[in-house]
Amino acid sequence: MPVAERPLRKLRLLPLLAATYFMVSGGPYGLEDIIGFAGYGRALLILALLPFVWSLPTALMIGELASAIPEEGGFYAWVRRALGPFWGFQEAWLSLAASVFDMAIYPTTFVLYLTHLAPSLTEGHRGLAIKLAVVITATLWNLRGAVSVGEGSVVLWLTALCPFVALIVDAVWIGLHTSHATLAATAKPDLSAAILVAMWNYMGWDNATTIAGEVDRPQRNYPRAMMLAALMVMLTYVLPVAAVWWAGIAPDRFSTGAWVDAARFVGGPTLALLVVLAGAVDSLGTFNALTLSYTRLPYALACDGLLPGIFKRQLRNGVPWVALLACATGWALALRLTFERLITIDLVLWGMSVVLEFIALIVLRVREPELPRPFRVPGPTWVAVLLGLAPTLLAIYALYASRTEQIAGIPALAFAIAVASGGLPLYLLAQLRNDHQRA
């Protein structure tokens, strides 16, 4: 792949950690449906156990591959090297297709939060205008380069979490001065939906790897960022949920955006306002960091001749501006989809891409045993096979669970498979285009 001119400054560990945190989580926003679907006890069990069978195996896999192949394009480059250009293209397509649904979630979540505080602000076209404002702001910010996004993520990260620190303290105080925390179960438990939402909240670990060419000492910093982010995400999920349970808030009061109501209950209108504002910061931070990640994929594909050369165009700071504008346009077109449908399709497509990454890990262990691996998953190759087993089974479960969802009048599973299959004709078109140019 041709090496483009890179910015002088690169992302260090702390900005990379903050950007990774936003790409995966951003904070407790989005957890409310898990409580509403499963109740507190089951929600905490899911949030505590899922990282060990979903997040940790994925983070370990990414740590090894990112340290061994620190190339721009990240997971696309790994799959291409292990399985060839066809499967590399499919990996990139799955991730870009998932991004259309994933990136619409964060502006949608912010509008849902704002509705809890000021419904009139989100009525009619106002809600769509707010979502578009998030897209435009992140696009302009990304034009400033990877270092600007990474360093800004540190500030946004701290700002987004501060209200939840206050919420936890207030909730614990209330719990200490009441007779007991509520033990009531949710009226209509839906464990399948709760697990799917939790899987979505714990996914996205590979997104930070697409900017490997813009990271300082990637062989050292990627494994550290993955492990630290995995621990931090789990803590920022479990602690607030446990705190509001202790405070005695009924689980059936929780749905998307209900952290605002919980904050009002434990800390009054001021804390509720701060949670809404932090939700805005969280949505922007997550959208901003993921914009940095996804826009490097069209650039990497163009460098390999699988997309038109116009996607290789960069600003002086290394930003692939054509890819950035094209992605932002696609994301804006999906803003009208509902939160639940976005999660279902996003999870199914991303799950497929992660399975390909685990296959790449195993194939590279077999074909290139001497490949330098500054970080290596402990044990022989069969351990790597076992490592990918649980995430693969969970991805299959997500496929199965989506069978009852409807998108555009067809089953969500069929819709997801149709979208995933779109990578085949697109690859053939790219090959025909290359053959024509060579002729």
Image: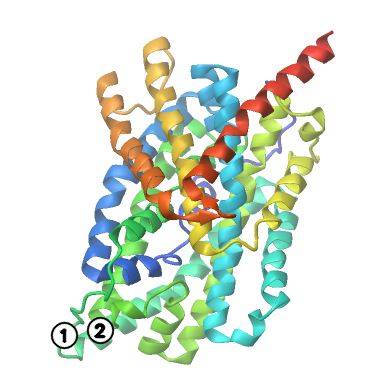
The x and y percentages for residue 6 are: 71, 34
The x and y percentages for residue 429 are: 73, 24
Q: At label 2, which amino acid type do we have? A: Gly
Crowding at dot 2, Cα within 10 Å, few <14 / some 14-19 / many 20+, comes out as many
The x and y percentages for residue 370 are: 40, 11
The relative height of residue 268 versus residue 80 in the rendered view (above or below) is below
Quarter-of-image position of residue 114: bottom right
The color scheme shown is rainbow
Q: At label 1, which amino acid type do we have? A: His
The relative height of residue 274 versus residue 229 in the rendered view (above or below) is below
Q: Can residue 369 be seen in this view?
A: no
The relative height of residue 120 versus residue 57 in the rendered view (above or below) is below
Residue, disc 1: 180
The relative height of residue 34 versus residue 378 in the rendered view (above or below) is below
For residue 236, side relative to residue 206 (left or right): left
Q: Residue at x 49, y 78 (%)?
A: 275
Determine whether label 2 and label 1 are within 8 Å by CB. yes
The x and y percentages for residue 121 are: 66, 83
Q: Can residue 110 be seen in this view?
A: yes
Crowding at dot 1, Cα within 10 Å, few <14 / some 14-19 / many 20+, comes out as few
Q: Is mark 1 on a helix, strand or loop?
A: loop
Q: Is mark 2 on a helix, strand or loop?
A: loop
Q: Residue at x 38, y 54 (%)?
A: 196
Q: Quadrant of the C terminus?
A: top right
Quarter-of-image position of residue 363: top left
Q: Residue 248 carries which label?
A: 2
Q: Earlier in the sequence, mark 2 or mark 1?
A: 1
Disc 2/disc 1 C-alpha distance (Å): 7 Å
Q: Which mark is residue 242?
A: none
